[in-house]
Image (cartoon, rainbow, N blue to C red):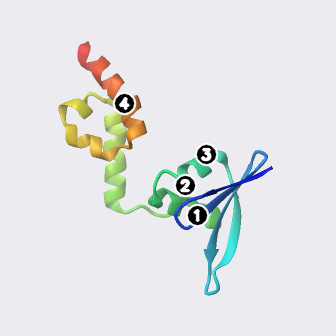
Amino acid sequence: MEEVYTGDGFAIVKNNNEYKIEWPHGPFDQVVSYSITKELADKAFKSSQDAYEVMMYAKTGKWPVKSTEDEEKEKVRDFIKKFPELLIQVPDNRELFTQSELKELLPLAEKNLEK
């Protein structure tokens, strides 16, 4: 059975366990469709930037080059994931994460601070 999940400017079509990402393209907005994995389908719904990256990867087979600012932000996120107590010690760091990520990281942060 085919299921369609719509995002901002794209749609994910799930048919059994196969996923496709579709979006209008070109001067006549013809729909283009590319096979993707479930992980990429999930990533596309995280943010508009993630959706763009998944579409470009599906189309070209290569990830778009991230700006230096994005790379730096990703490095900071990775560091904080290793030391989640920084989310409590420096609350501004929470802006780098989604609510669902914070639900996972904050209990770890509290546990690390108790040591």
User: Are dots 2 and 4 in contact, CB under 8 Å?
Assistant: no
User: Are dots 4 and 1 in contact, CB under 8 Å?
Assistant: no
102 displayed left or right of 9: left
Tell me the quadrant of the picture where the C terminus can be found: top left
Q: How far apart are marks 1 and 3 (CA)?
A: 13 Å
Residue most extreme to the bottom: 27
- Mark sitting earlier along the chain (4/1): 1
Q: Distance between the residues labelled 4 and 1?
A: 29 Å
x and y percentages locating residue 36 in the rendered image: 68, 54
- Mark sitting earlier along the chain (1/2): 2
Label 4 secondary element: helix
- Mark sitting earlier along the chain (2/4): 2
Q: Distance between the residues labelled 3 and 4?
A: 21 Å
Q: Distance between the residues labelled 1 and 2?
A: 8 Å
Q: Is residue 72 or residue 56 the one in the foreground?
A: 56
Decide: is 107 above or below 99: above
x and y percentages locating residue 105 in the rendered image: 36, 30
| Amino acid type of the residue tagged 4 in the rendering | Leu
Q: Label 3, on which residue?
A: 39
Quadrant housing residue 39: top right
| Amino acid type of the residue tagged 3 in the rendering | Glu
Residue plotted at (31% across, 17% down):
111
Q: Label 1, on which residue?
A: 55
Q: Label 4, on which residue?
A: 105
User: Are dots 1 and 3 in contact, CB under 8 Å?
Assistant: no
Label 3: few (<14), some (14–19) or many (≥20) C-alpha neighbours in 10 Å: few
